[in-house]
């Protein structure tokens, strides 16, 4: 469990249409995401807003002092047995030392486990600018299970991390 004494942080497990612009700003301010990636992320938000609980995408939003501070998006991997993808996680740059990312990740893991999920997969880039991201996942018990060279571009591998949530019977 993530320990945070900060009473200014609150979480909610759903998105609303008003969150679309906030998430767009959050991702645009984050140096890690390309415009095409941001558009995909926003499509997942729109899907969840339109379909509600019938969407394949689940969200947790963190608010700090009443404003969007970060979010995580995850969902089941179709055609698998109890496996989930963590699609997006992002926290405002100026709030990154407040353990909001850890709080989002731990709560996503709990929700996935409650849904019967057995494992979570996360992918990221091998580029140096993602080193802190990779360390964040390792710190939270994820381990590298695949590295596909030249996946995103020449010299930019796809790195896949995994964490088991419950023993497989």
Image (cartoon, grey):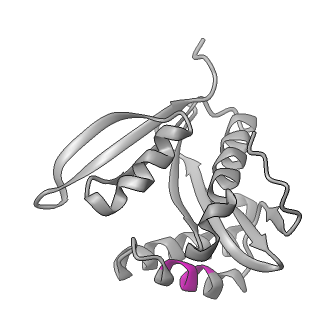
Q: Is residue 151 above or below residue 120?
A: below
Main SS of the magenta part reads helix
In the visual, does 48 lie left or right of 9? left
Q: Quadrant of residue 146?
A: top left
Q: Quadrant of the C terminus?
A: top right
Q: Residue at x 78, y 73 (%)?
A: 64
Q: Residue at x 47, y 83 (%)?
A: 28
In the visual, does 33 lie left or right of 76? left
Q: Nearer the viewer, residue 107 or 42?
A: 107
Whole-percent x, y for residue 121 in the image: 47, 41
Q: In the current view of this chain or complex, which residue is farthest to the top?
A: 169
Q: Residue at x 72, y 86 (%)?
A: 18
Q: Is residue 82 above or below residue 49?
A: above
Whole-percent x, y for residue 21 in the image: 62, 88
Q: Is residue 95 visible?
A: yes
Q: Residue at x 61, y 17 (%)?
A: 167
What is the span of residues highlighted in magenta in the rendered image?
A: 23-27
Residue 19: in magenta span: no
Q: Nearer the viewer, residue 8 or 43?
A: 8
Q: In the current view of this chain or complex, which residue is farthest to the right?
A: 7
Q: Quadrant of residue 70?
A: bottom right
Q: Is residue 78 visible?
A: no
Q: Is residue 118 above or below residue 92?
A: above
Q: Nearer the viewer, residue 85 or 161?
A: 161
Q: Quadrant of the N terminus?
A: top right
Q: In the current view of this chain or complex, which residue is farthest to the left?
A: 154
Whole-percent x, y for residue 114 in the image: 76, 36
């Amino acid at each position: 469990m993530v320990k945070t004494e900060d009473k200014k942080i609150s979480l909610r497990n759903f998105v609303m249409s008003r969150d679309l612009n906030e998430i767009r700003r959050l991702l645009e301010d984050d140096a890690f995401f390309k415009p095409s990636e941001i558009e995909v992320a926003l499509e997942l938000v729109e899907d969840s807003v339109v379909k509600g609980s019938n969407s394949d995408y689940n969200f947790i939003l963190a608010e700090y002092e009443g404003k969007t501070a970060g979010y995580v998006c995850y969902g089941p991997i179709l055609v698998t047995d109890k496996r989930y993808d963590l699609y997006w996680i992002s926290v405002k740059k100026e709030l990154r030392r407040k353990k909001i990312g850890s709080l989002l990740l731990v709560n996503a893991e709990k929700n996935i486990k409650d849904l019967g999920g057995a494992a979570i997969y996360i992918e990221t880039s091998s580029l140096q600018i993602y080193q802190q991201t990779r360390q964040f996942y390792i710190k939270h018990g994820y381990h590298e299970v695949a590295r596909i060279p030249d996946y995103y571009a020449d010299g930019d591998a796809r790195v896949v991390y995994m964490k088991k949530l419950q023993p497989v019977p």
